């Protein structure tokens, strides 16, 4: 794991097209802004984990050929 120190309005670049900006820091909360292509799903980890669990629960019922890939995780842009 890479650990970086940033101040408000400073950014981190991942690859050529993902930018993470520190928007605000208040106490133990950090507000981040994420700019990424629409093809890159961006989710809070706890939401991502819930959707994986939901997809696993529905996978046996999706045997009729319907896609069960993360239960449509790519739809919402940011959670």
Image (cartoon, rainbow, N blue to C red):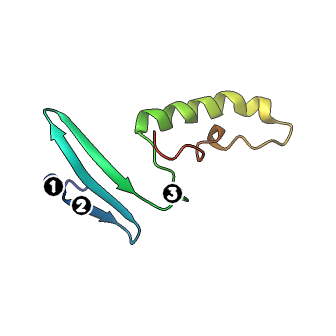
Pointers 3 and 2 in contact (C-beta within 8 Å): no
Chain-order first, disc 3 or disc 2: 2
**In the image, is 16 to the left or to the right of 7?**
right
How far, Cα to Cα, is label 2 from label 1?
A: 7 Å
| Category of crowding for the residue at label 1, using alpha-carbon neighbours closer than 10 angstroms: few (below 14), some (14–19), many (at least 20) | few
| Category of crowding for the residue at label 3, using alpha-carbon neighbours closer than 10 angstroms: few (below 14), some (14–19), many (at least 20) | few
How far, Cα to Cα, is label 3 from label 2?
A: 18 Å
Give the answer, above or below, for where 31 lies relative to 40: above
At 60% across and 45% down in the image, what residue appears?
75
Which image quarter: residue 35?
bottom left
Counting from the top left corner in percent of width and height, residue 47 is at: 47, 34
**In the image, is 71 to the left or to the right of 46?**
right
Question: Which residue is under mark 3?
Answer: 40
Counting from the top left corner in percent of width and height, residue 57 is at: 66, 27
At 46% across and 48% down in the image, what residue appears?
42
Helix, strand or loop at disc 3? loop
Counting from the top left corner in percent of width and height, residue 60 is at: 75, 31
Pointers 2 and 1 in contact (C-beta within 8 Å): yes
Helix, strand or loop at disc 2? strand
Which image quarter: residue 31?
top left
Chain-order first, disc 2 or disc 1: 1
How far, Cα to Cα, is label 1 from label 3?
A: 23 Å
Chain-order first, disc 1 or disc 3: 1
Q: Quadrant of the C terminus?
A: top left
At 43% across and 60% down in the image, what residue appears?
36
The answer to which of 66 and 40 lies nearer the viewer is: 40
Counting from the top left corner in percent of width and height, residue 44 is at: 41, 39
Which image quarter: residue 54?
top right
Give the answer, above or below, for where 72 lies relative to 15: above
Q: Which mark is residue 11?
A: 2
The answer to which of 9 and 58 lies nearer the viewer is: 9
Question: Which residue is under mark 1?
Answer: 6
């Amino acid at each position: 794991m890479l650990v970086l120190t940033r101040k408000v309005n400073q950014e981190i670049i991942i690859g050529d097209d993902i930018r993470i900006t520190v928007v605000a820091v208040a106490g133990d909360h950090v507000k981040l802004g994420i700019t990424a292509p629409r093809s890159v799903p961006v989710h809070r980890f706890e939401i991502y984990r819930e959707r994986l669990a939901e997809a696993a629960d529905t996978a046996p019922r999706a045997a009729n050929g319907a896609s069960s890939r993360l239960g449509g995780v790519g739809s919402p842009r940011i959670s």
